[in-house]
Amino acid sequence: MRPPLETAALPADAIEIGRITDAWGIKGWFKVLPHSASPEALFSAKSWFLLPPDRPVKPQRGIPAASAQQAWTEPLQLNILEVKDHSDSVVARGQGIDDRNASESLRGGRIFVSRASFPAAAEGEYYWVDLIGLQVLNREGVDLGQVRDLMSTGPQTVLVIEAAAEIEGGKPVERMIPFVAAFVDGVDLPGKRITVDWQPDY
C-alpha cells in the first residue's frame, strides 16, 4: 500500500538517519530505529524525506503482490508533528498519518533529512557524517588514509580509516584510531582533514 503522502525531491544535502520499523498504537504513530545513538536530527527536523526499503516489502496475507508493491518508488515528504523517546526506541507521528493502516504503510521506509536542519554541534563535538571522507594525517604530515566509517565501542568512538595507497594482502590497509583528545589533535572541517598523534605502524 502506498503511504498517503506527496512525492518530493530529495534535498541535495540529504543524510539517511534512520528507518521506520513498525506501527505503534492505533492513532498513526510509528516506531523509528535511528542510525545514531544520539539522534538529535530526528528531533530537530520538521520534515523527513522517506525512501522505500532497499528490498521490496513482502506482500501481506490477502493482498495481491502487485498491489502490495505498487506506487512507492519515489521520495515522499512527511511533515513531522511529534517525536519522542519511548522505552528503548523512538516513536513519531506525522501529518496525514492518522491511523494504524497509514503508519503500517511506512514500514521499512528509510528516513532522510537535510543536513542543514541538523542542530549546531557543541564546541569540540562533531557529527559522524561530517567526519566521513576526511583525510587523516599525523603530526609529521604522513597521510594515514581517509575516514571510511566510525564505530562506537561504548565509552569512546573509533575512526575507521582506509589507506587506499597502502595495499596489504590485496586490500587497502585499515587503521582504527580512537577519537579522543589523547590521539586527535584537531579537526579541520573546511580543510577536510584530521590531525592525529599516530604512527603508520601502530
Image: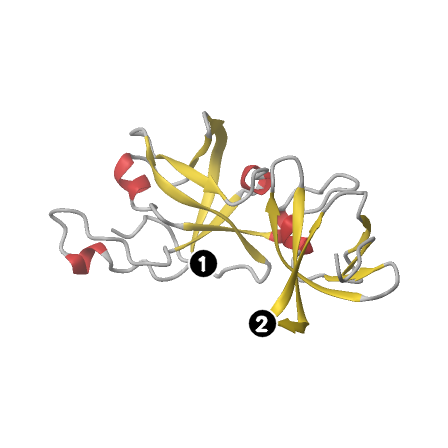
Q: Quadrant of residue 46?
A: top right
Q: Which is nearer the N-term, disc 2 or disc 1?
A: 1
Q: Callout 1: helix, strand or loop?
A: loop
Nearer the observer, 68 or 80: 68
Q: Residue 157: x, y in percent?
A: 66, 44
Q: Amino acid at mark 2?
A: Gly
Whether residue 95 sits left or right of residue 60 in the image: it is right
Total labels: the figure holds 2
Q: Amino acid at mark 1?
A: Ala
| Nearer to us: label 2 or label 1 | 2
Nearer the observer, 124 or 198: 198
Q: Which residue is mark 2?
A: 169
Neighbourhood count class around disc 2 (C-alpha, 10 Å): few under 14, some 14–19, many 20 upward = few
Residue that appears at 32% across and 49% down = 3
Q: Residue 131: x, y in percent?
A: 69, 55
Residue that appears at 83% across and 53% down = 197
Residue located farthest toward the right when viewing the structure as drawn? 140
Q: Quadrant of residue 42?
A: top right
Q: Which mark is residue 8?
A: 1
Neighbourhood count class around disc 1 (C-alpha, 10 Å): few under 14, some 14–19, many 20 upward = few
